[in-house]
């Protein structure tokens, strides 16, 4: 079945239109490894996700640390530190880089100003912005860099909102 899917994929997307691989390996893979790669490439996204979960369970790996994903696993090779310590270190760095801007509350008289300011830094319509403000405490913007989060918080506090950065 996997070979049939691979064949169909090759018919639909000619190899000449695919980008060339941006990496090379010095070792030629064995026929068994090549067969596994062909089979994995034929998986759907749902099947690939299931495969990853199953492998994590069998190998006793909770999750790859974000740093290892960004560096292709090279962070775990030379450090001499276990994956748990690297994962905690990467998680601490990640938390410091991205913030959530959360509206804790606001003055009733400042509601319109808060809605206008919210619409200025989001792409929300009037109705959506009003609903978001009314259901406070609510996250107004998630995963923003520190400078942007502080700027948003400062502007929102200036119009009467109680803002927390998480």
Image (cartoon, rainbow, N blue to C red):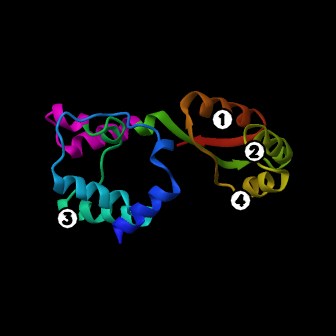
Q: Is residue 8 above or below residue 158?
A: below
In front of the other: 43 or 152: 43
- 88 magenta-colored: yes
Q: Earlier in the sequence, mark 2 or mark 3?
A: 3
Cβ atoms at labels 1 and 4 below 8 Å apart: no
- At a point 83% along the width and 56% down the height, the residue shown is 127
Secondary structure of the residue carrying numbered label 3? helix
Examine the image and state in which quarter residue 75 appears.
top left
Residue of label 3: 58
Q: Earlier in the sequence, mark 4 or mark 2?
A: 2
> Tag on residue 135?
4
Examine the image and state in which quarter residue 78 appears.
top left
- At a point 55% along the width and 33% down the height, the residue shown is 145
Secondary structure of the residue carrying numbered label 2? loop
Residue of label 2: 123
Q: Position of residue 96 (x, y in %)?
A: 44, 34
Q: Earlier in the sequence, mark 1 or mark 4?
A: 4
Question: Is 5 situated left or right of 29 in this image?
Answer: right
Work out how far the residue at label 3 is from the one at label 4, CA to CA, in angstroms.
Answer: 43 Å
Work out how far the residue at label 2 is from the one at label 3, CA to CA, in angstroms.
Answer: 43 Å
Q: Magenta span covers which residues?
A: 74-93
Question: Is 75 situated left or right of 146 in this image?
Answer: left
Work out how far the residue at label 3 is from the one at label 1, CA to CA, in angstroms.
Answer: 45 Å
For marks 3 and 4, give the one nearer the viewer. 3
Secondary structure of the residue carrying numbered label 4? loop
Q: Main secondary structure of the magenta part?
A: helix
Q: Position of residue 72 (x, y in %)?
A: 30, 38
Residue of label 1: 153
Cβ atoms at labels 4 and 2 below 8 Å apart: no
């Amino acid at each position: 079945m996997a070979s049939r899917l691979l064949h169909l994929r090759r018919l639909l997307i000619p190899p000449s239109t695919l980008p060339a691989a941006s990496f090379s390996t010095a070792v030629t893979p064995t026929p068994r490894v090549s067969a596994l790669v062909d089979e994995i490439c034929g998986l759907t996204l749902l099947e690939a996700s299931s495969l990853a979960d199953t492998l994590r369970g069998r190998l006793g790996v909770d999750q790859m640390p974000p740093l290892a994903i960004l560096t292709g696993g090279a962070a775990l090779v030379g450090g001499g530190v276990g994956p748990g310590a690297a994962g905690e270190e990467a998680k601490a760095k990640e938390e410091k880089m991205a913030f959530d801007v959360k509206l804790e509350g606001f003055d009733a008289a400042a509601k319109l100003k808060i809605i206008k300011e919210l619409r200025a830094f989001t792409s929300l319509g009037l109705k959506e912005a009003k609903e978001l403000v009314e259901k406070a405490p609510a996250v107004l913007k998630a995963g923003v860099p520190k400078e942007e989060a502080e700027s948003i918080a400062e502007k929102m506090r200036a119009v009467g909102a109680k803002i927390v950065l998480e």
